[in-house]
Amino acid sequence: MKNSANKIPFGERLQQIRTKIVTSGKNLLDEDEIEKELASRRGGLQGRED
């Protein structure tokens, strides 16, 4: 079993990832771009209303 005492809280880890992306100069995705990315990874844009 993994030792949870050594784990970084999930929200803190997400903030670290976001900071790393912003620092790199890349643009963050907006809500529509996130939906499109998720749909493409799940097999397409079927059932999506624009």
Image: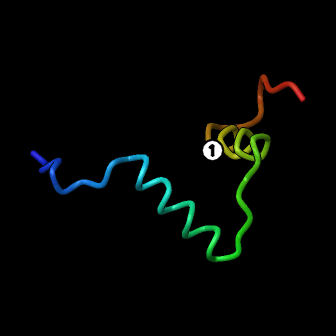
Q: Position of residue 48 (x, y in %)?
A: 80, 27
**Type of residue at label 1?**
Arg
Secondary structure state at the residue bearing disc 1: helix
The crowding category of the residue bearing disc 1, from other C-alpha atoms within 10 Å (few below 14, some 14 to 19, many at least 20), is: few
- Which residue is outermost to the left? 1
Q: Please state the total of marks drawn on the protein image.
A: 1
Between residues 4 and 2, which one lies in front from this camera angle? 4
Q: Position of residue 6 (x, y in %)?
A: 18, 57
In the rendered image, the quadrant that contains the C terminus is top right
- Which residue is outermost to the bottom? 24
The residue drawn where x is 47% and y is 62% is: 16
Q: Is residue 44 left or right of residue 5?
A: right
Model colouring: rainbow
In the rendered image, the quadrant that contains the N terminus is top left
Q: Check disc 1 and report the residue beneath it.
A: 41
The residue drawn where x is 50% and y is 56% is: 15
Between residues 24 and 38, which one lies in front from this camera angle? 24
The answer to whether residue 44 is above or below residue 12 is: above
Q: Position of residue 18 (x, y in %)?
A: 57, 60
The answer to whether residue 26 is above or below residue 43 is: below
Q: Quadrant of residue 36?
A: top right
Between residues 41 and 26, which one lies in front from this camera angle? 26
Q: Quadrant of residue 25?
A: bottom right
The residue drawn where x is 71% and y is 58% is: 28
The residue drawn where x is 71% and y is 70% is: 26
